[in-house]
Image: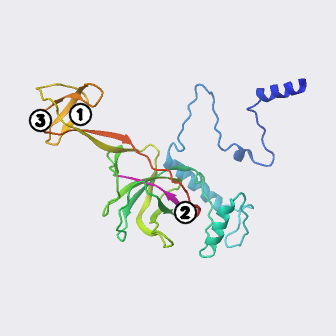
Amino acid sequence: MLIEILVQAKRYTYYDEVDTLLDVPAIKSFAKYRGLKSFRTSTWDPKCFDNFTRTQKHVMAKALEMEQESRDDCVPTGSYARIYIKDVPLDVASKLCVVSRTCPIVLCGLLQHESKMSVLQFSIKKHDSYDAPIKAKEEFISHVGFRQFVARPIFSTYNMNLDKHKVERFLHAGRFSIASIYAPVSFPPLPLIVLKGAGGSSAPLAAAVGSLRSIDTDGIILKKIILIGYPQRVSKFKASPVEAWTKCGRRGRIKEPVGTHGVMKCRFNGGLQQHGTVCMSLYKCAYPKWPEHRFPVLKA
C-alpha cells in the first residue's frame, strides 16, 4: 500500500518530465516544441509562419544543400528501391492497389512544413471549355504541383490596395479571382488544375486553372449582405454613427434603435419618400469549407 502511494506521488510530481529516446534524435522527438524563457512574460506566436517568404527561402536553401551533399541515408539518383509503408488502413491500401493497375503511383519527398495544413490562396480562372456554374464551397479535386487533394474553396475579389476582400458566390468566366482553401502547405510558384467530377465512372472535367499565389492565414475575406427596410415615419433631422443608404442615392446614419425588432431612428442627407427602401451593408468573415475527404482515392 505504501509503495503504491509513493508511486502515485512520484507520478503526479514528475508527470511532465520525459526522457530523450536513445534510438530517435532529439530534434525529431521534440520537433513540435518551442522554448520559452518565461511562461508568464515570453510571447508565443500562434502563427505557423511569421514571414512566409523568408521561411520559403530558408527551406529551399536547406533542400538544395541536402541535395548537393552525399548522404548514406538517401537513395542515389537513377537507382531502384523497394519501399515499405506501414500503418496504412486496409480499405485505403486496397484502393491504391486498384489504382496502380491503371496508372502509376507517384511517390515524392516533402520539403520542411509541407506536411502541415494552412490556408492557400490561388489566382484562378474558369476554364473556357467548362460551361457549368462553379459555386463556392463545392467539392473540387485540386491538382497542385505533384499533389492532388479534395478542397472546398471560397472565391473573392482581389485588390492590392485594400486589406479586405469581398466574397464571390460563383467563379465568373473571363477574369481571375482568388480561391482560398484549406490544404497542405506548398511553396509557390506551382500550377493549379481544378477538376470537377462528371458523375458515374466518367473522368473528371477541367473546371478552372490557375497558380499558387501565397499562404496567408491573416487575409480578411468578408461576405456582404444588404439589410433592407422601409421608413415608417419621416421627420426632419436626426443623427449618429452606422451608415444606412437608400436606393434613391440618399446617405444617412443610424441614431438609435427603437425596440428589439429592427426599428431604428436615422438621419439622412436629404428628404425620403414614404415608399422608399432603406438599406444597410453588413459583413462577416468568410472561411473555406473543410472537405469531408482530403484525397480523391478515399472517396472512390
Circle 1 sits on which residue?
A: 243
Mark 1 vs mark 2, CA separation in Å: 47 Å
Q: Magenta residues?
A: 148-156
Q: Magenta includes 40?
A: no
Q: Residues within 10 Å of mark 3 (few under 14, many from 20)?
A: few
Report helix, strand or loop for mark 2.
Answer: helix
Q: Residues within 10 Å of mark 1 (few under 14, many from 20)?
A: some
Q: Nearer the viewer, mark 1 or mark 2?
A: 2
Relative to 25, say whether 107 is above or below. Answer: below
Residue at 14% of width from left, 29% of height from top?
233
Relative to residue 116, is residue 75 drawn left or right? right
In the rendered structure, which amino acid carries the disc numbered 2? Pro
Report helix, strand or loop for mark 3.
Answer: loop
Relative to residue 159, is residue 196 drawn left or right? right
Label placed on residue 296: 2
Mark 3 vs mark 2, CA separation in Å: 56 Å
Label placed on residue 274: 3
Residue at the bottom extreme?
102
Q: Earlier in the sequence, mark 1 or mark 3?
A: 1
Q: Earlier in the sequence, mark 3 or mark 2?
A: 3
